[in-house]
């Protein structure tokens, strides 16, 4: 038999480390379907008690920006400091800004 | 020392120890990165449980014996694990079938052990049960995936079931220590687990489109220390460190 090894599709894994925090991208893995992706994610990324919730999404469903277009996408923002709210005095009571 | 309790603990823990060793052999050799990590995770869970059992056994034995001596310095005939768990990693189908046939038993067993009058044993069972529930989910999912998969994967699972089925009956045999400890409210009556076990296992196999073998004669002996030819090789590998460097620790 010809050894044509079919790879499982790639999945992106997002883990919420604690209740109240957002899901963060942890990495990717291979799995045959969503259910297996969840189990694999549990074993690959949360075996040291890193999470309380896992999301998986097949990598092909993610639309990514093209690095070749970084110029027009991002650079125009660089010289517009007035877009950052850094000119206000924040009261001490407001944290995490 | 209560030698019945000591032997009883070994009878439980040796299954975990030997299956954990078998799964550990897969470290770096699993069929894919994901299944490799999953199998070695299960191995680590089992070793974690073994440590609790053997620390308890070592305490019963006294004389400053530690868990490593209980685990690594016994001759083959003194290991009381069932024959099923020492069977080799022939291929992924055998690994999954062996795991499934053991997990289904292990889960039923721990559910009963939780009710033990021995608080240490019931605490270990209580702590292990979440891990083992996951093991059972993992292995039964794979049985269904591969059994109800391609012609080739189905044939491989069927083949492994046909080969390993002969080791299932031994899980429900009682030894001397069992009888005494059941009397004391400490031990689990494994004969009572047999009917729920076969009904649960058959149900998963039916979903996996796998035939349940029709077998009249079953293998036994592990619980008496009479092992298959694979056991010596496994122990040589497992005991090497403690034999070559006595009392070594990491």
Image (cartoon, coloured by chain):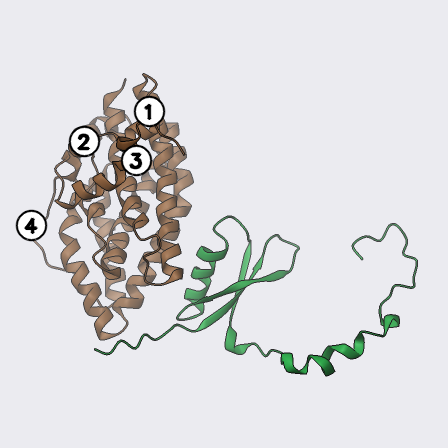
Chain colours: A green, B brown
Q: Nearer the viewer, residue B180 or B248?
A: B248
* Residue A78 lies in quadrant: bottom right
Say which chain tag 2 marks: B
Which circle, 4 or 2, is nearer the viewer? 2
Residue A94 badge = none
Along the polypeptide, which appears first: circle 1 or circle 2?
A: 1
* Quarter occupied by residue B31: bottom left
Disc on the earlier residue, 3 or 4: 4
Of marks 3 and 2, which one's residue comes earlier in the chain?
A: 2
Quadrant of res A55: bottom right
Q: Secondary structure at mark 3?
A: helix
Q: Are marks 3 and 1 in contact (CB under 8 Å)?
A: no
Disc 1 vs disc 2: Cβ atoms closer than 8 Å? no
- How far apart in space, not on screen, are marks 4 and 2 (Cα)? 28 Å
Q: Residues within 10 Å of mark 4 (few under 14, many from 20)?
A: few
B131 or B27: nearer the viewer: B27
Disc marking residue B241: 3
Residue that appears at 18% across and 60% down: B160
In space, the residues marked 1 and 2 are separated at their CA atoms by 17 Å
Residue B40 vertical position relative to residue B160 in the rendered view, above or below: above
Disc 1 target residue: B58
Give residue B67's position: percent from left, percent from top. 34, 29
**Can marks 1 and 4 be said to lie on one chain?**
yes
Q: Which residue is mark 4?
A: B217
Cβ atoms at labels 1 and 4 below 8 Å apart: no
Task: Compare residues A37 and B64 and report the one nearer the observer.
Answer: B64
Q: Nearer the viewer, mark 3 or mark 4?
A: 3
Secondary structure at numbered mark 4: loop
**What is the spatial separation of the Cα atoms under label 1 and label 4, in whole angstroms?**
37 Å
Residue located at (41% from left, 39% from top): B126
Q: Which residue is mark 2?
A: B75
- Asked if residue B131 lies left or right of residue B6, the reply is right
């Amino acid at each position: 038999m010809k050894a044509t090894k079919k790879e499982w599709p790639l999945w992106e894994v997002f883990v919420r480390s604690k209740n109240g925090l957002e899901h963060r991208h942890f990495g990717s893995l291979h799995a045959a379907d969503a259910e297996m992706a969840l189990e694999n994610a549990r074993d690959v990324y949360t075996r040291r008690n890193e999470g309380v919730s896992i999301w998986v999404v097949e990598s092909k469903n993610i639309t990514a920006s093209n690095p070749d277009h970084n110029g027009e996408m991002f650079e125009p923002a660089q010289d517009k400091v007035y877009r950052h709210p850094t000119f206000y005095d924040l009261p001490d009571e407001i944290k995490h800004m | 020392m209560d030698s019945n309790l000591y032997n009883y603990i070994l009878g439980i823990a040796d299954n975990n120890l030997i299956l954990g060793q078998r799964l550990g052999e897969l470290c770096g050799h699993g069929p894919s990165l994901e299944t490799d990590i999953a199998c070695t995770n299960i191995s680590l869970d089992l070793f974690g449980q073994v440590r609790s059992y053997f620390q308890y056994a070592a305490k019963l034995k006294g004389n400053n014996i530690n868990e490593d001596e209980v685990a690594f310095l016994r001759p083959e005939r003194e290991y009381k694990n069932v024959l099923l768990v020492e069977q080799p990693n022939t291929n992924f189908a055998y690994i999954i079938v062996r795991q499934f046939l053991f997990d289904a038993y292990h889960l039923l067993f721990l559910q009963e052990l939780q009710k033990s009058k021995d608080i240490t044993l019931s605490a270990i069972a209580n702590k292990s049960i979440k891990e083992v529930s996951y093991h059972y989910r993992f292995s039964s999912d794979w049985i269904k995936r591969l059994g109800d998969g391609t012609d080739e994967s189905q044939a491989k699972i069927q083949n492994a079931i046909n080969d390993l089925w002969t080791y299932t009956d031994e899980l429900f045999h009682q030894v001397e220590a069992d009888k005494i400890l059941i009397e004391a409210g400490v031990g689990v009556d494994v004969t009572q687990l047999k009917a729920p076990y076969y009904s649960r296992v058959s149900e998963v196999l039916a979903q996996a489109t796998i035939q349940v073998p029709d077998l009249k004669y079953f293998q036994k002996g592990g619980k008496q220390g009479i092992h298959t030819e694979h056991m010596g090789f496994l122990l040589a590998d497992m005991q090497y460190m403690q034999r070559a460097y006595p009392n070594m620790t990491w």
